[in-house]
Image (spheres, grey):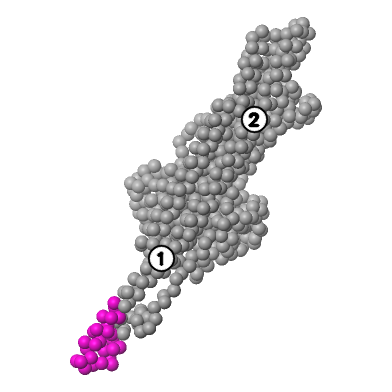
Amino acid sequence: MTADATPAPRAPEHPLQPAVLRLAADAAGLLERAARAGGDAGPDGGRDAGAAGAARAVEETPVPPELAEAVRAEAARVRGGAAVLVVVGEKKRGKSSLINALVASPGLLPVEVDVATGVHLVVRHAEEPYAVAFLEGDTAGQPVPVGAIGEYAALDPVTQEPYRRDVRHVEVGVPSALLSSGLVLVDTPGVGGLVSGHARITMATLTRADALVFVVNGQSEFTASELRFLEQATERIAEVVFVLTQTDKYGSWEQVLERNRQLLAEHAPRYAGAAWFAVSSRAKEDADLAAASGDPVAGQRLAASGFPPLLAALSDRVAARAAELRLANCLRAVTSVVAPLAAAQERRLRSLRQDPALQEEVQQRRDALRALQGEDAAWRRTLTRSSRALERRLRLGFQRNVNDLRQLADEKMASAPPAVLAAELSRDLEAGVEAIWLDLDTAARQGTAELAAEMERACGVTAQDAAVAELALARPRRLEALPTALRSEDLNGGVLGFVERVVPSWGAGGLAAGVTMLFTSSVAAPLVAGFGMVALLTNRRRRRQELIRARGDAARFTARLIAELTTEIPPEISRTVEEITENLAARLTERLAAQRAALEDELALHQKNLATAAEQLGRERERTRRRVEALEDLLARSRDLGARLEPAQAGPR
């Protein structure tokens, strides 16, 4: 491991992070105390007076225990979350070398070999280096030597086949100043990285990323496939960072960069004004080595490498924005659970003040909840209708992806020579299947969140929790191992078969020359010419038959693969949507019942308060007033922090 020459220690946390985390801790403690029936709601040694008062404020209010867990989970995402950067580029553009240079770990990722189809390399910060390979059907992962990453993630350079076919992705941890600022790097497959099925799997990955790092080198301008990819990527991701590598190797890189800017303006105008960073990974490695040895020129070498502006941009533009988003999500989680408690305590204060209008208001809310609990409640019909719409949307998206996969295979069969078709089609389709699965899983998770939000609007209670959010498509076992591509044999025999086998290896010209040497008479000349023509025709016929066989094999493989997909996936979509619907309905039913019971208790307490002398309620009234103030203080803190976050989130990207 080489010392990092970058003069950037671990990036400081977001300025508002401590305040947001304190707010989340106060809210979670309040909810935990409220969930413990009869528990001690007294002050806590580590909590301020306002939080302790808020905890006492909700003794009488039933609170589901999972609400505190939800707030703590959002706070954990603030502490441990990281922005995901997907690194994309055609093979041999310097992607892996760039990542190695960014994290100051020469040789960490395989450079001279390509990453296997469907395998992603995830690089995150760790105090000590480690590597874990995640195999098919294994969620825990298998520790592997850091130096052996290529054995699990790469292709054999000779056969172009994966060393391991059972690997889904490999996670690598390294101590790195850049990664410690809140970033995770994902190296995408490098076999024709932006063409065919590989473009599809990379595109599907972008839906889960915070930014795209697009890598080209100083040798040549954008290819057509790269420009097509960028046109499509605009629909998936907003933040793109362009990096031109190998400036030390190609002297004309500045002209190439300018031409790339022109091509972007023409084909992907959204990124016409995007920043470019020209770097040399080799120079960065030299700078890191110089820093490790104490060489005073390390800083100059680092500046010459072009990396300082790139490192600053990744930390400031990507990591910081992702941190802001996580903070905003945490504030929303706090507000969504504290606001109902504050409203309940406000009504309690009105009851203690013997407000005559309160009873009618609570009765109306109770009656509304009673209507929501009925079997014919409108929200149940909405849930059924929206669930069916989600299933139709998932099925339609799946079918479109399958159609695209079929078109990908058709284009490959129409344009690729037999040897390329046999070698690449199965890998392209394998990547395409993985992309379909990523798209479906992402769409299912997003659809679940949207469905839960719709139910919350319809019922006024929180519908989604961690259990519902984790409901996702289960990968069918039959798709863990894709069908094997079969190759038919050439069964032609006899003299014609012999000629077809011999002529291509000798060559028509060589055969004709040999015959001419043997037959020099004028009688033999027509025979030589005729035999040469036969050789040419049979060679052409052999190539045509070979192409027909290869296309037939490819068509049969494609048909079998698509048949497996269309057989296994649609039932899994239906099962998952049904499970999501049932879970949402069960949670809504439980929470509506709990709220109605709480309102019944509130009515009984209000009637008791109405029958009590006003002076006897004075002490409790003062206590409740302080409780309301404590809860309102939490909400005010949340609103203030949210307002301070908004200007930063609304800034230019």
Secondary structure of the residue carrying numbered label 1: helix
Report whether residue 280 is seen. Answer: no
Q: Which amino acid does label 1 sit on?
A: Gly
Question: What residue is rendered at 61% in x and 42% in y?
Answer: 470
- Most common SS among magenta residues: helix
Question: What residue is rendered at 70% in x and 19% in y?
Answer: 600
In the image, residue 300 lies at what x, y percent?
Answer: 51, 53
**Magenta span has 533?**
yes
Dot 2 or dot 1: first in sequence order is: 1
Q: Quadrant of residue 63?
A: top right
Residues at circles 2 and 1 in contact by the CB criterion of under 8 Å: no
Q: Distance between the residues labelled 2 and 1?
A: 56 Å
Secondary structure of the residue carrying numbered label 2: helix
In the image, residue 91 lies at what x, y percent?
Answer: 45, 59
Report whether residue 476 is seen. Answer: yes
Q: Name the residue under label 1.
A: 552
Q: Which amino acid does label 2 sit on?
A: Thr
Res 172 label: none
